[in-house]
Amino acid sequence: MSGFLNFVYYYPLFMAFLWMIGSIYYFFHWEDGGRKDYTKPPKLDRYPGVSILVPCHNESENIEESVRYCLNVEYPTFEIILINDGSTDNTGEILDRLACQNKNVRVIHLATNQGKAMAMNMGALASNYEYLICIDGDAILDKHSIVWIIRHFITGPRVGAVTGNPRIRTRSTLLGKIQVGEFSSIIGVIKRAQRVYGRVFTVSGVVAGFSKTALHRVGFWDTDMITEDVDISWKLQLAFWDVRYEPNALCWILNPETLRGLWAQRLRWAQGGSEVLLKNFPRIIDCGVKCRRMWMIIIEFIISVAWSYAVFLVLLFWLIGLVAPLPDFLYIKSILPGWTGVVLGAACLLQFATGFIIDSRFESRLGKYYYWIIWYPMVYWLINVLTLVCGFPKACYRRINKTRAIWKSPDRGVR
């Protein structure tokens, strides 16, 4: 059992330092140590037309605000395609009104809920331009984001997708405040590190740019995957297209601020990531060394699944040991952290500080959320462990019984 417990404690410690080292290298190598000002995007040799795709399902409360910010982007040539995916509220009426008021806004109506992937496919096929910027119906796109994203396609002929940098808008509750820190010190740090050691696990579903040529080569988005963003990221990279991270491409988003909403979101992420792994693992094995840049992503995810089950078993044996005798090799006296827990906690705080320092140029008062992020291991680790433990079997079942992945309106937090 000691070796088992060592794995539980030391795996996150190792990954924390791996991510920190990778993100710091990325920061100085590709972000010039923070000297790049996101409000002053680079001058491009050319500005190709861009289609902004906004799939919508019951977004009547948010879509007008999102479209207004899209119309204000500083880019010479763009169109906005709003895809109404079988909304049951008055989203369709709002979209039609927006199209009548703005000549570069078009609307596509789907009679029934076909899922986000199908909505994106329809928008891509109807688009007039080669490059697509895909955002959610509740997102606020920064006016400079398109230029920051498009520069990768202009300078990199093998770039198939570019993921932006989502920032949390909902900050009224403890869960919201923790997520502000999470997106900087966890998600942002991890994406930077992944770019350094090979491939990105996923583009951000709420803000990402795509080459339509690359999408066509891989068959666009699959409609049976619960996380279309993870799936398309792996499809592109397995076809040897590059997926990049652009931290200057900001997009402000609404996120869950209730435990129920957070659980639903993280369960979807866990199940979706597992589905993509199960779908692509045989192909990666057959591909061999040609797909070696994906190995680190796969190993990282497989070990994270094993770690989640290990943590779950530790908690389970500890609870059983409170009420019933167990063999010595299964008995866990306490789950309270000893010196290993203190070291792990210190590493977490160091990782949080690294992320906050790197992203502070995007938000001048980001440091005030450092106090709240210290609760992350206690709340989010447990949620992420349990959702992965539940999500992996759901993914296995769904791979056997394939159905179209439709979407529901998520928890948007307290605004």
Image (cartoon, grey):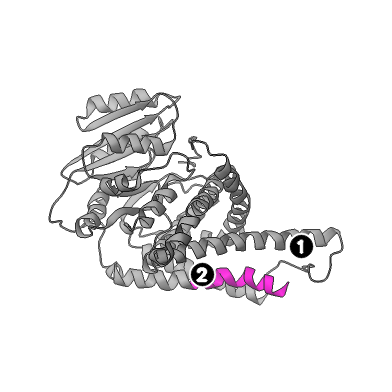
Residue 359, percent from left and from top: 37, 62
Q: Is residue 16 magenta?
A: yes
Disc 1 versus disc 2: distance between alpha carbons? 25 Å
Q: Taking 207 as reference, is 104 above or below it?
A: above
Vertical side of 6 occupied by 229: above or below: above
Q: Residue furthest toward the right?
A: 325
User: Which numbered circle lies on residue 318?
Assistant: 1
Q: Quadrant of residue 108?
A: top left
Q: Which percent across, then down, holds residue 221?
A: 38, 43
Residue type, numbered disc 1: Trp
Q: Position of residue 298 (x, y in %)?
A: 49, 62
The dominant secondary structure in magenta is helix
- Asked if disc 1 and disc 2 are in contact, CB closer than 8 Å, the reply is no
- The residue indicated by pointer 2 is 15
List x then y, in percent, for residue 360.
36, 63
Q: Secondary structure at mark 1?
A: helix
Q: Please give the name of the residue rendered at 77% of the width and 68% of the height, measured from the top-left corner.
A: 332
What is the secondary structure assignment of the residue under circle 2?
A: helix
* Vertical arrangement, residue 60 with respect to residue 232, above or below: above
Q: Is residue 105 left or right of residue 197?
A: left
What residue is rendered at 28% in x and 56% in y? 159
Residue 292 among those drawn in magenta: no
Q: In the current view of this chain or complex, which residue is farthest to the left?
A: 45
Callout 2 amino acid: Met
Q: What stretch of residues is rendered in magenta?
A: 1-17
Closer to the camera, 199 or 286? 286
Instruction: Give left or right: position of 70 versus 176.
Output: left
Circle 2 packing at 10 Å, graded few (<14), some (14-19), many (20+), is: some
